[in-house]
Amino acid sequence: MTKARRQQNTAGQEAAALRQPGSASRLQGEQRQARAYIGIGSNIQPQEHIRQCLALLAKLPHSQPSGESPWYLTRPWGIEQQPNFINLVVGLNTGLSAPALLCATQAIEQRLQRVRDIKNGPRTIDLDILLFDDAVIETPNLIIPHPALLQRDFMLLPLLDIAPKQLHPLEGRRLCDLSDRIQYHQIIEQLPQP
Ligand code: AMP
C-alpha cells in the first residue's frame, strides 16, 4: 500500500470511528504504548523510598506499571563505603516518549530528595531507563539501551526475571543469552517478597 493510500485509509478509519458514539474521546486518548523497563535502586531507607517510588510511577500520565522483579540486596558499585542497596526492575507500558519518560523519572528522583553530591554515592532513589521498546537512542541526556545494562548483574538479572525473552536491540540477541557479559557481580541475595 502506498504512503498516501495508508494515510487516506487511516483518515477514513478515524472518521468512521468518530461517527461511533463515545469514540471521539477514545481517539483523543489513544496513544501508542511503548514497553519500557526501569531499574530502581536505593540505599537510604530503601524499603520506604522504593515503595514511594513505585506509587509515583503508577501515577505517571498515560502509563501503567506492569511487571515487577523480585527485590535484590546488592553491594554498592563505585564507592564501597556506603550501605548496601536494594535493586529491582519494573515494566511500564507508557504513552510517553523516551525523553518525556526521562523527565518524569528525574522528577520522581527530585520528589524523593535525591541529592547528586557524590557520584555513585548514597541515594534515596536512582531510576535508570534500561530499555524503551526496541529503541536505540544516543543523545547527551539519554542513552538507551542503558550502557550498563549488560555489565551489572543488578540491572540485567532482575530484568531477566520479568522479560527473559526480550531482545537487546543493539545485540539482536535475547537478554537470557547475554548474561555471560556481566562484569560486576554485586548481588548478595534475593530478598523475601515484601
Ligand atoms: P545517574 O547518576 O546514574 O542517575 O545518571 C543520571 C544521568 O544519566 C542523567 O544526567 C541522565 O540524563 C543520564 N542518562 C543517560 N541515559 C540514561 C538512561 N537510560 N536512564 C537514566 N538516565 C540516563
Image (cartoon, helix red, strand yellow):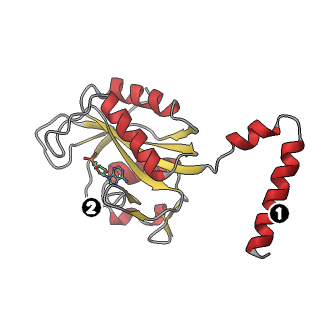
Residue 180 location in percent, x, y? 36, 65
Disc 2 Cβ-to-ligand 1 distance below 8 Å: no
Q: Quadrant of the C terminus?
A: top left
Residue 183 is marked as 2
Q: Which amino acid does label 2 sit on?
A: Gln
Of helix, strand and loop, which one carries label 1?
helix
Counting every numbered tag in the picture gives: 2
Tell me what residue is drawn at x 25 percent, y 56 percent.
184
Of helix, strand and loop, which one carries label 2?
loop
Note whether residue 34 is visible.
Answer: yes
Tell me what residue is drawn at x 45 percent, y 65 percent.
136
Number of other residues with Cα within 10 Å of mark 2, as a class: few under 14, some 14 to 19, many 20 or more: few
Number of other residues with Cα within 10 Å of mark 1, as a class: few under 14, some 14 to 19, many 20 or more: few
Q: Nearer the viewer, residue 114 or 139?
A: 139
Horizontally, residue 186 falls left or right of residue 174, namely: left
Q: Which corner quadrant of the image does residue 148 belong to?
A: bottom left
Vertical position of residue 46 compared to residue 26: above or below: above
Residue 34 location in percent, x, y? 57, 51
Decide which of tag 1 and tag 2 comes sooner along the chain.
1
Residue 9 is marked as 1
Residue 188 location in percent, x, y? 28, 42
Q: Which corner quadrant of the image does residue 123 belong to?
A: top left
Task: Judge depth for marks 1 and 2 and give the one in front.
Answer: 1
Residue 21 location in percent, x, y? 88, 35
Determine the residue located farthest toward the left in the rendered image: 81
Q: Which corner quadrant of the image does residue 1 belong to?
A: bottom right
